[in-house]
Image: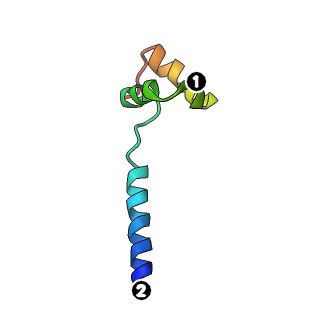
């Protein structure tokens, strides 16, 4: 029973962090991407960065 409670608690903690990421194209997301190694960007991230961060069309 204790192992089940521990596993459930760990899962809830992990899920709570997953919901905290910034929306792609938002100013916060752009700031995070500027800090990320560009070699680790996906093609989709690069396109979103160009569209919203370089051109200044941040999502609200």
Q: Is residue 25 visible?
A: no
Residue holding disc 2: 1
The residue wearing badge 1 is 47
**In the image: residue 41, left or right of residue 56:** right
Secondary element at image label 2: loop
In the rendered view, would you say 34 is above or below 21? above
Q: Is residue 1 above or below residue 45?
A: below
Which element is circle 1 on? Answer: helix
**Front position among marks 1 and 2:** 2
Q: Are marks 1 and 2 in contact (CB under 8 Å)?
A: no
x and y percentages locating residue 39 in the rendered image: 59, 27
Q: Quadrant of the C terminus?
A: top left
Mark 2 crowdedness (10 Å alpha carbons): few <14, some 14-19, many ≥20: few
Q: Give the distance between the C-alpha atoms of the residues marked 1 and 2, in whole angstroms.
A: 47 Å
Residue in the foreground of this view, choosing between 57 and 31: 31
Q: Quadrant of residue 16?
A: bottom left
Which residue is found at the position 44% from the left and 79% from the top? Answer: 4
């Amino acid at each position: 029973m204790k192992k089940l409670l521990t596993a459930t608690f760990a899962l809830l903690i992990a899920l709570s962090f997953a919901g905290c990421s910034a929306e792609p194209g938002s100013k916060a997301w752009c700031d995070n991407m500027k800090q990320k190694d560009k070699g680790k960007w996906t093609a989709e991230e690069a396109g979103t960065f160009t569209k919203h961060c370089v051109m200044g069309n941040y999502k609200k």
